[in-house]
Image (cartoon, grey):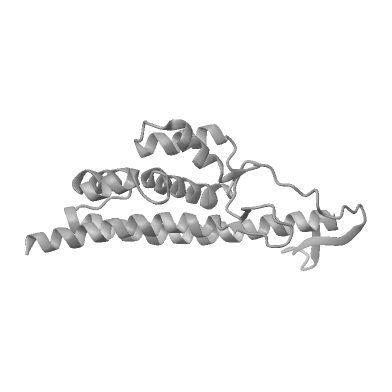
């Protein structure tokens, strides 16, 4: 997916000039080390990607809370600690038929296990590489391989690649129609968080059912 700025008013006029500096520890004076000028279009683009960055940090925080819940649930069920996603998901999927079924068949129309691994890999890119994804094909293959889901590979690839634009994690809203006035959008951030909450719901529900059976 490419970013379309064709509707923007293009301008070559420089409207912003910035200087960056730091306090020199030896002289005690401000030392400038970089300068930047920007046009209106460049400022629009910076704002656009800055908004995406804010969404990325929110998603990273959401995943870390999800992972904390998953670790706690895994420990409660097995008495073991795990810092790796794959064995925890494998345990829940293999131990509870309801989870395994809903991973593959749900109202999202995607494999929830692939979705969780996708968000985990997005979190890693955000935390360690500023959201950059230098090789989208390698990123996608890693998500699918670690999910352990071998079927419907093309569908999984298409699913993953919609969240990578210009070699960056991309989770901003995308247009859902071409109506000239009543524009609607897909809220990609909300959808990704929904995948995490939905999987957590499956785990919680399975644990509740198990507790009731053991009473």
Picture coordinates of residue 3 (x, y %)?
70, 46
- How many numbered circles are shown? 0
Left or right: residue 203 versus residue 5 is: left
Q: Nearer the viewer, residue 211 or 78?
A: 211
Picture coordinates of residue 101 (x, y %)?
27, 45
Left or right: residue 146 versus residue 36 is: left
Considering every residue shown, the one lying at the far right of the view is: 13
Dividing the picture into quarters, in which one does residue 193 lie?
A: bottom left
Which residue is pictured at 77% across the width and 49% down the height?
Answer: 5
Residue 93 visible in the snapshot: yes
Looking at the rendered image, the quarter that the N terminus falls into is top right
Picture coordinates of residue 179 (x, y %)?
70, 56
Which residue is pictured at 87% across the width and 52% down the height?
Answer: 10
Picture coordinates of residue 183 (x, y %)?
67, 60
Q: Nearer the viewer, residue 75 or 25?
A: 75
Left or right: residue 169 versus residue 89 is: right
Q: Which of 210 and 38 is in front in this view?
A: 210
Which residue is pictured at 56% across the width and 36% down the height?
Answer: 136
Considering every residue shown, the one lying at the far left of the view is: 215
Looking at the rendered image, the quarter that the C terminus falls into is bottom left
Reply above or below: 169 against 201: above
Left or right: residue 5 versus residue 87 is: right
Dividing the picture into quarters, in which one does residue 180 lie?
A: bottom right
Residue 34 visible in the snapshot: no
Which residue is pictured at 93% across the width and 56% down the height?
Answer: 13
């Amino acid at each position: 997916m490419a970013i379309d700025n064709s509707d923007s008013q293009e301008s070559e006029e420089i409207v912003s000039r910035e200087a960056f500096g730091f306090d020199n520890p030896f002289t005690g004076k401000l030392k400038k080390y970089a300068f930047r000028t920007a046009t209106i279009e460049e400022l629009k683009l910076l704002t656009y990607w800055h908004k995406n960055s804010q969404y990325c940090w929110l998603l990273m925080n959401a995943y870390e809370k999800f992972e904390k819940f998953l670790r706690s649930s895994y420990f409660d069920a097995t008495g073991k600690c795990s810092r790796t996603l794959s064995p925890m998901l494998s345990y829940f999927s293999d131990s509870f038929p309801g989870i395994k079924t809903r991973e593959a068949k749900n109202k999202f129309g995607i494999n929830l296990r692939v979705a969780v691994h996708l968000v985990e890999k997005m979190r890693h890119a955000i935390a360690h590489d500023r959201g950059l994804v230098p090789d989208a094909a390698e990123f996608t293959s890693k998500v699918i391989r670690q999910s352990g889901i071998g079927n419907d590979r093309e569908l999984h690839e298409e699913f993953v690649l919609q969240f990578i634009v210009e070699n960056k994690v991309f989770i901003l809203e995308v247009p859902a129609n071409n109506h000239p006035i009543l524009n609607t959008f897909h809220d990609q951030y909300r959808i990704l968080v929904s995948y995490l909450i939905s999987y957590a719901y499956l785990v919680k529900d399975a644990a509740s059912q198990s507790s009731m059976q053991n009473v």
